[in-house]
Image: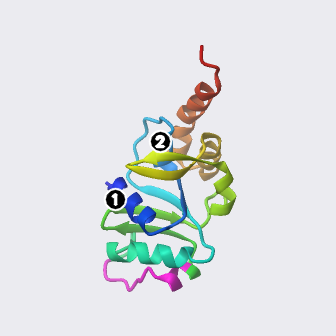
């Protein structure tokens, strides 16, 4: 399991610009679905890559699902040459996406976010219509299963309160 508070604190304290997507975003919008990792789309402009590398360095980021001992350094050079990273860290699984299927980059997603207090601090989180679009575009069985609940939450959020 991911220590979400610690993961988000590491990113916030490291001045990493990011948008929360995936299961944590779904939960923030009221979903009952559980998730084991944190999915974020991170910014790649200017100082962003250096901030990300520096923030994660003390937490031993390592590629998830690869054999132990494979030479891997999560540093600026690696981030610049890559885009999407599925990592294990000291605080648990972290999926870092330079681009999200169906949503694009941080800059493309930012206008479709809301600021929520997640695990003790403010975070940009995709809005519910965008989360639904991302889940549909991902098309994995677990995403398809989540769509009905997310769509019901969206309908409920747009009905006038009496």
Residue sitting at x 41%, y 68%: 87
Magenta: main secondary structure: loop
Task: Specify few, some or many for label 1: CA neighbours under 10 Å numbering under 14, 14-19, or 20 or more.
Answer: some
Does residue 103 appear in this view? no
Task: Specify few, some or many for label 2: CA neighbours under 10 Å numbering under 14, 14-19, or 20 or more.
Answer: some
Q: Pinpoint residue 144: horizontal percent, then vertical percent.
A: 56, 42
* 119 up-or-down from 104: above or below: above
Q: Nearer the viewer, residue 157 or 145?
A: 157
Q: Pinpoint residue 12: horizontal percent, then vertical percent.
A: 45, 62
* Side (left or right) of 36 relative to 31: left
In the picture of the structure, the residue carrying the numbered disc 1 is: 6
Q: Quadrant of residue 59?
A: bottom left
Q: Secondary structure at mark 2?
A: helix
Q: Which residues are magenta?
A: 68-79
Q: Earlier in the sequence, mark 2 or mark 1?
A: 1
Q: Pinpoint residue 49: horizontal percent, then vertical percent.
A: 54, 76
Residue sitting at x 31%, y 83%: 69
* Side (left or right) of 79 relative to 9: right
Q: Secondary structure at mark 1?
A: helix
* Image marks 2 and 1: residues in contact by CB distance under 8 Å: no
The CA span between labels 2 and 1 is: 17 Å
In the image, residue 87 lies in the stretch drawn in magenta: no
Quadrant (top left/top right/bottom left/bottom right) for the C terminus: top right
Q: Say which mark, if any, is on residue 28.
A: 2
In the rendered view, how is the structure colored? rainbow
* 136 up-or-down from 57: above or below: above
Q: Quadrant of residue 148?
A: top right
Q: Nearer the viewer, residue 87 or 142?
A: 87
């Amino acid at each position: 399991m991911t220590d979400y508070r610690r993961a988000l604190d590491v990113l916030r304290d490291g001045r990493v610009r990011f948008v929360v997507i995936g299961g944590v975003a779904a939960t923030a919008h009221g979903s009952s679905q559980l998730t084991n990792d944190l999915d974020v789309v991170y910014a790649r402009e200017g100082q962003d890559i250096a901030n990300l590398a520096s923030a994660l360095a003390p937490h031993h980021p390592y590629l998830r699902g690869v054999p132990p001992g494979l030479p891997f350094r999560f540093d600026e050079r690696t981030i610049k040459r890559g885009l999407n990273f599925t990592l294990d860290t000291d605080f648990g699984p972290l999926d870092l996406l330079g681009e999200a299927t169906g949503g694009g980059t941080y800059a493309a997603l930012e206008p479709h976010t809301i600021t929520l207090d997640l695990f003790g601090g403010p975070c940009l989180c995709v809005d519910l219509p965008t989360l639904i679009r991302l889940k549909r575009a991902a098309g994995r069985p677990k995403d398809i299963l989540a769509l009905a609940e997310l769509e019901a939450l969206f309908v409920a959020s747009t009905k006038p309160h009496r």
